[in-house]
Image: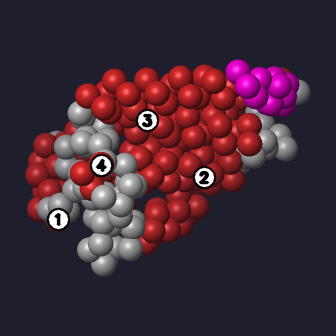
Amino acid sequence: MTGKTHQIIGFASLVIGAAVFMPDSLNAYTLTACILGNSIGSFTPDLDDAGNRLWDMLPAGNFVGRFARKIFYRHRTITHSILGGFLFYKGYLWLIPRMVNPAYVDTHLVIISIMTGYIAHLAADMLTIDGVPLLFPFKWYFGIPPISFLRIRTGSWVETFLVFPGVIIATAAFIVSHYSSYIELIQLIRS
Ligand SMILES: [Zn+2]
């Protein structure tokens, strides 16, 4: 899946998750941090891809990218696995309380939002032909459905014209059918 598709799927998961697992309290600072965190979590697994935007954003991005490509010679390795997810979770658990002000921001919700993006990324990549090595270091690639030729090719018309708009429409439909939960969420922020 392309970065754009991962961002929209990650965000949709956050929007739906917020209504299903309604937080007890929420303020505007936490909401902002959760949306940013979700976006970071949504592209974290593709850190192993040297073409990833994050590498490009670094000063000397191309140099770092070429270096990273030597290490992560294959797209989708440890960062697309349960082990990788656990290690990133532990890393964010350490990092987030040091990066944001816990007096204003609920760091627990931020970490949940990051991992929502992360898990949504792995689930979305499972729909593609390559699949993901969930049990890395074992080189077994898992996908949905299990037969790879039924899956989507990254950047194909199916992704662009069916998956991407489909996620937006499905999320909008979910919001409409659960609007009372979202009203509650808005009231939480204002209170
Ligand atoms: Zn990926």
Res 7 label: 3
Q: Amino acid under label 3?
A: Gln
**Is residue 101 found inside the magenta-colored segment of the image?**
no
Q: Looking at the image, is mark 2 or mark 4 nearer the viewer?
A: 4
Q: Secondary structure at mark 2?
A: helix
Counting other residues with Cα less than 10 Å from the Cα at mark 3, is it few (<14), some (14-19), or many (20 or more)? many
Q: Residue 23: horizontal and vertical position, in percent? A: 79, 43
- The answer to which of marks 2 and 4 sits earlier in the sequence is 2
Q: Which residue position holds label 1?
A: 71
On the image, the x and y values in percent for residue 16 come to: 65, 37
- Considering only order in the chain, which callout, 2 or 3, is on the residue closer to the N terminus? 3
Q: Amino acid at mark 2?
A: Ile
Give the structural element (helix, strand or loop) at label 4: helix
- In the picture, the quarter occupied by the C terminus is top right
Q: Position of residue 71 (x, y in %)?
A: 17, 65
- What amino acid type is highlighted by mark number 1? Ile
Q: Earlier in the sequence, mark 3 or mark 4?
A: 3
Q: Are marks 1 and 3 in contact (CB under 8 Å)?
A: no
Q: Nearer the viewer, mark 3 or mark 4?
A: 4
Number of numbered discs on residues: 4
- Figure quadrant of the N terminus: top left
Q: Position of residue 77 (x, y in %)?
A: 28, 64
Q: What is the distance, in whole Å, between disc 2 and disc 4 at their CAs?
A: 34 Å
- Depth check: 146 or 17 in front? 146
Q: Which mark is residue 111?
A: 2
Label 2 crowd bin: few (<14), some (14–19), many (20+), radius 10 Å = many
- Name the disc covering residue 150, or none: 4
